């Protein structure tokens, strides 16, 4: 079973990739490093994982749950301390010494051992940890990390007597890292703030007393009190009181929901007014909020192609630029007699710009920001790959019942045939549907309005796509659609009825039918309009309902096409036919209830479960889960996905463009080390702040 561990000292996205790759090469079946949350998820021996991590990234430490998180006896690989402000204790004195050295050398023209000593002291104040980490990493064979590259570049500058520039580059690099740490920490806090939905405590009722306990301590069957203003700690059922609750943490819906005795209440909701007594139905680890947080935090396991490409690209990019720097330093002096110091300096510029972190850093932050933003809107996306796919949605297929319609059915008309009364038809239909949880079955049982004696039901058979057959006190009853009548050759005079119809057959004789009406969701037409406005070229509706009902619903909500009277496997065939006609870069999205539509949800490029609040089956099946039943959330999800992808590509193009420009300028001698480190750190900072735009 996967185990989640904390990684202290992990503040480098490319280092996260190195750790993940090393663990996989060493035989771990599952290894995932989540840079955004600084967590490692593995299946295997933790102690062995610790050894591998220490070898690959000596300054990164694995912290298990039972260990104290405030253990400060470790060196950070990139020396991003828990509090980045501590770095100022080294930056400020170094900056003072650097300023003094610059004044003495360039204003008073002193260039002696004393001035050299001032520059060395300034350099070591900010650079000693970089030098230490570079040495440790080199011993372990990692010569292409940013510490080693900056160390080689600045020591090389000292070697050619450019020590003011060597100190300046190291100082600016550390200042840049300081601001980068602050930006990354702020981004992480912004993301985690979206997910800070767990209650800190619960009011457990023990006899006549109320005891404050941790939510983890609650067991199924416990009675808790939720006071106004408190967050619900675990899932449960209200057994006393009524109140309004804020469900925005789960659904993104700002309008409060009324909760009363007998209603289900979910963890993460906030009690707004009345005092509620709740019976616990799920422990914390199984409650809704825990499942949501786990889904969002683990979404990085499913990486987008863009993310995979850029991490692999960076893996080869750095050695390539370092190799190019070696050629620049050696070939002109050896082949053409050029001054060695001149070309060595140009090579050092290339070393500075070859640091990979600016390129890799913003990509996971960008995708995680998009996933976090979607979660705040009540849209759970299970991975950045699905976020990318959603951004390319061009064909959207909706299931009808419970997705575009409310799925709240009522029997609105009863038609009798062959001498049967209305009471008989409703009674037989209700008994036949006694074991079904289908919305139509519930409507029939509700219309019957009496307690069902299940002892009367001797046999019960579900006939997929047709209806049910049951033996009731020796009487055979069938309830279903028109296909059921034709399948069993039941003589009847009615095939086409406006509305959802349940035909009733008693002992082979047609007894009549019940008309069950459903209602279109208020925002369904708006959802269709918004999708078309976003460039979705085809919106279709698929349903198992009869053609007359489907045609009327399709007309009202404005879909382009509809397919009616479909079995579950027929819906899959519809998606497969659409798949054949779409372009390679187009994606098909199917939106259903996540329980009955599992096969087609799995077959589509992106399966979206609607109306899935609290539904385990929906969360397991779908790629995207909309935590309320509003189809208008789907266009919002597409917008977030497109904005995320746009920002991610902006960062990639910007980072690559700047780096390639400085590689060219460095070879031509038109760029200094100052400018190179300024560009590298500046790109990283801009990329991080750009990624944070998604959250806003």
Image (cartoon, rainbow, N blue to C red):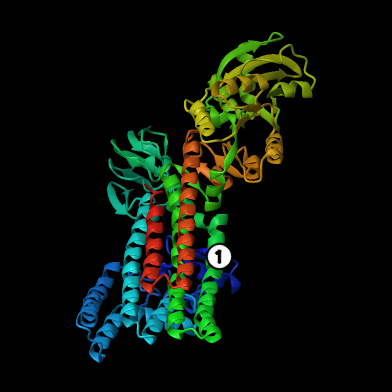
Up the image or down, 267 lies above or below 24; here it is above
Give residue 424's position: percent from left, percent from top.
63, 15
Callout 1: few (<14), some (14-19), or many (20+) C-alpha neighbours within 10 Å? some
Dividing the picture into quadrants, the one containing residue 589 is top right
Left or right: where does residue 621 sit relative to residue 110?
right
Total marks placed = 1
Q: Is residue 539 left or right of residue 480?
A: left
How far across and how far down the image is residue 299, in percent? 50, 54
Say which residue appears at 49% left-offset and 56% top-offset.
Answer: 653
Up-down relation of residue 68 to residue 560 (above or below)? below
Q: Nearer the viewer, residue 125 or 338?
A: 338
Residue at 52 percent of width and 24 percent of height: 520
Q: Secondary structure at mark 1?
A: helix
Can I make out residue 20 in this image? no
Residue 454 visible, this angle: yes
549 and 209: which is toward the camera: 549
- Residue that protrudes farthest toward the top in the picture: 419
Percent from the top left, x then y, of residue 547?
67, 22
Q: Can you tell which quarter of the image residue 577 is in?
A: top right
Q: Which residue is mark 1?
A: 313
Residue that sits furthest to the right in the current view:
489
Residue 284 is situated, as x and y percent measured from the top left of the image, at 42, 52
Residue at position x 80%, y 20% in the image: 489
């Amino acid at each position: 079973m996967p185990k989640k561990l904390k990684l202290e000292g992990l503040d480098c996205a490319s280092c996260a990739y190195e750790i993940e790759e090393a663990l996989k090469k060493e035989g771990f079946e599952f290894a995932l490093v989540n840079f955004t949350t600084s967590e490692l998820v593995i299946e295997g021996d933790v102690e062995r994982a610790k050894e591998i991590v220490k070898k690959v990234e000596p300054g990164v430490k694995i912290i298990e749950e039972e260990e104290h998180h405030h253990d400060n006896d470790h060196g950070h690989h990139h020396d991003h301390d828990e509090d980045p402000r501590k770095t100022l204790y080294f930056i400020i004195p170094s900056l003072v010494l650097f300023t003094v050295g610059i004044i003495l050398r360039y204003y008073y023209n002193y260039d002696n051992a004393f001035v050299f000593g001032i520059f060395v002291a300034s350099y070591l104040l900010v650079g000693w940890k970089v030098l230490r980490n570079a040495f440790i990493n080199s011993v372990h064979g990692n010569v292409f990390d940013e510490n080693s590259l900056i160390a080689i570049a600045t020591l090389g500058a000292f070697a050619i007597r450019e020590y003011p520039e060597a100190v300046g580059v190291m100082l600016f690099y550390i200042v840049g890292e300081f601001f980068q740490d602050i930006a990354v920490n702020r981004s992480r806090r912004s993301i985690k703030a979206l997910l800070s939905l767990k209650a800190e405590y619960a009011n457990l009722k023990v006899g006549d007393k109320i005891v404050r306990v941790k939510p983890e301590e609650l067991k199924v069957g416990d009675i808790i009190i939720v006071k106004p203003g408190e967050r619900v700690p675990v899932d449960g059922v209200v057994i006393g009181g009524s109140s309004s609750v804020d469900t925005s943490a789960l659904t993104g819906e700002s309008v409060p929901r009324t909760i009363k005795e007998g209603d289900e209440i979910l963890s993460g909701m906030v009690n707004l007014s009345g005092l509620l007594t709740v019976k616990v139905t799920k422990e914390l680890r199984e409650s809704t909020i825990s499942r949501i947080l786990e889904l969002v935090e683990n979404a990085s396991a499913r990486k987008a192609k863009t993310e995979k490409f850029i991490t692999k690209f960076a893996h080869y990019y750095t050695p390539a630029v370092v190799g190019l720097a070696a050629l620049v330093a050696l070939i002109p002096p050896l082949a053409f007699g050029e001054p060695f110091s001149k070309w060595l300096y140009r090579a050092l510029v290339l070393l500075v710009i070859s640091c990979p972190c600016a390129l890799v850093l913003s990509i996971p932050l960008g995708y995680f920001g998009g996933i976090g933003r979607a979660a705040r809107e009540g849209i759970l996306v299970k991975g950045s790959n699905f976020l990318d796919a959603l951004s390319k949605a061009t064909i959207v297929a909706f299931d009808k019942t419970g997705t575009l319609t409310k799925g709240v059915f009522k029997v609105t008309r009863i038609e009798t045939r062959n001498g049967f009364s209305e009471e008989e038809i409703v009674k037989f239909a209700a008994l036949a549907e006694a074991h079904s949880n289908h919305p139509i079955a519930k409507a029939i049982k509700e219309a019957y309005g009496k307690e069902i004696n299940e002892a009367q039901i001797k046999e019960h058979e579900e006939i997929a796509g047709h209806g049910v057959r049951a033996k009731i006190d020796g009487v055979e009853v069938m309830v279903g659609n028109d296909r059921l009548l034709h399948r069993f050759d039941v003589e009847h005079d009615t095939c086409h009825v406006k509305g959802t119809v349940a035909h009733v057959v008693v002992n082979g004789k047609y007894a009549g039918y019940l008309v069950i009406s459903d209602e279109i969701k208020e925002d369904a037409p708006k959802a269709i309009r918004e999708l078309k406005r976003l460039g979705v070229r085809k919106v279709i509706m698929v349903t198992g309902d009869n053609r007359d009902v489907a045609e009327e619903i399709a007309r009202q909500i404005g879909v382009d096409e509809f397919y009616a009277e479909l079995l579950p496997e027929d819906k899959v065939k519809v998606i497969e036919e659409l798949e054949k006609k779409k372009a390679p870069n187009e994606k098909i999205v199917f939106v259903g209830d996540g329980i009955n539509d599992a096969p087609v949800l799995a077959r589509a490029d992106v399966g979206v479960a609607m109306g899935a609040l609290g539904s385990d089956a929906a969360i397991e099946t779908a790629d995207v889960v909309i935590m309320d039943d509003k189809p208008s959330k789907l266009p919002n999800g597409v917008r977030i996905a497109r904005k995320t992808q746009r920002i991610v590509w902006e960062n990639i193009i910007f980072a690559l463009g700047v780096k390639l420009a400085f590689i060219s300028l460095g070879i031509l001698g038109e760029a200094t080390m100052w400018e190179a480190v300024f560009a590298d750190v500046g790109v990283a900072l801009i990329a991080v702040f750009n990624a944070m735009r998604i959250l806003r």
